[in-house]
Image: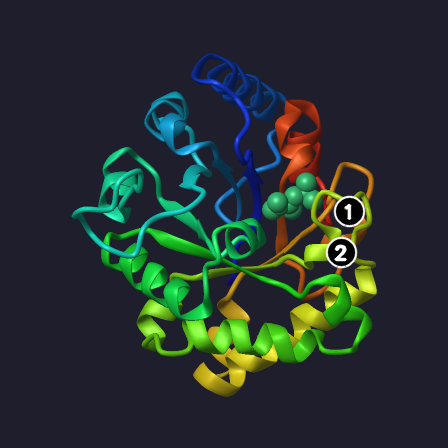
Amino acid sequence: MRKKIVAGNWKMNKTLEDGTSLARVILYLLSSSNPLDENKIMIIAPPALLVDNISKVIAGRKHVYVAAQNCHSEEKGAFTGEISAPMIKAAGASYVIIGHSERRAYFHETNDFLMKKVNAALMAGLRPIFCCGEVKEEREGGKFFEVVKKQISESLFHLSADDFKRVVIAYEPVWAIGTGLNASPAQAQDMHAYIRNLISERYGKELADDTSILYGGSCNGKNAAELFAQPDVDGGLIGGASLKGDEFVAIAGSFPGR
Ligand code: PEP
């Protein structure tokens, strides 16, 4: 059974002190509302400098994990300023976000480079949260399926089925990120079903049914329940709203049947 996941991408926000208190607030609120279980998990993705400390803060808490927001494709070497997947793993993270649209746009990360990062993450024992999604012009030009297919097939479909099992996919239409304009539940469902079908064609239905596909892009406490009610939407990658402890925990409690 695939996991339902709420992941918070803090981006370049929060100092060590502020991030530590936010993580503590989240844990405190989780204790009272208790929305998580074996199949509904939370992931916190703080800036890299906080990964070690936030991992210590959440240590021993069930169903809560830490992710890094990026990793380099090489294990070590002369890459000034970069952080490798083994370093992230050693700092206590279990996941790493790869291919966020901000990395693709501002740091010119290509599908090919992201493929190498996915490999590096898996080699280090991290689970990639692989982001894909079209920009506004591609949505308006009706090219969104084509773009997402290319991103996924060029960066992920070289993987063996055993490796692919460790990947989480986040569909994040770029026009929805940080804009307050979320994809409609129907638009999200259409794309998630399309992605699941792509996975099924490549790896078979069983693996496709087991893959968690998250939605990201202006998902918040108000719209999460409707988005998460879609049959192929397995949770969210949350940016802005993950910086408010109460809203983030409310989003984690937005899965159907609660
Ligand atoms: C993101 O950057 O991954 C994201 C989904 O941001 P926001 O929720 O702020 O749109």
Q: Nearer the viewer, residue 203 or 139?
A: 139
Q: Amino acid at mark 2?
A: Ala
Image-quadrant location for residue 58: top left
Q: Nearer the viewer, residue 191 or 37?
A: 191
Residue 47 picture location, percent across and down = 45, 32
Residue 140 picture location, percent across and down = 82, 71
Q: Residue at x 52, y 57 (%)?
A: 104
Residue 131 picture location, percent across and down = 54, 58
Q: Residue at x 76, y 56 (%)?
A: 229
Q: Disc 2 designates what residue?
A: 229
The numbered mark at residue 78 is none
Cα–Cα span, label 2 and label 1:
6 Å
Helix, strand or loop under label 1: helix
Colour option used: rainbow
Q: Residue at x 56, y 55 (%)?
A: 105
Q: Amino acid at mark 1?
A: Ala
Residue 167 picture location, percent across and down = 43, 62
Q: Disc 1 designates what residue?
A: 225
- Pointer 2 with pointer 1, Cβ within 8 A: yes
Q: Nearer the viewer, residue 176 or 31?
A: 176
> Is label 1's Cβ within 8 Å of ligand 1?
no
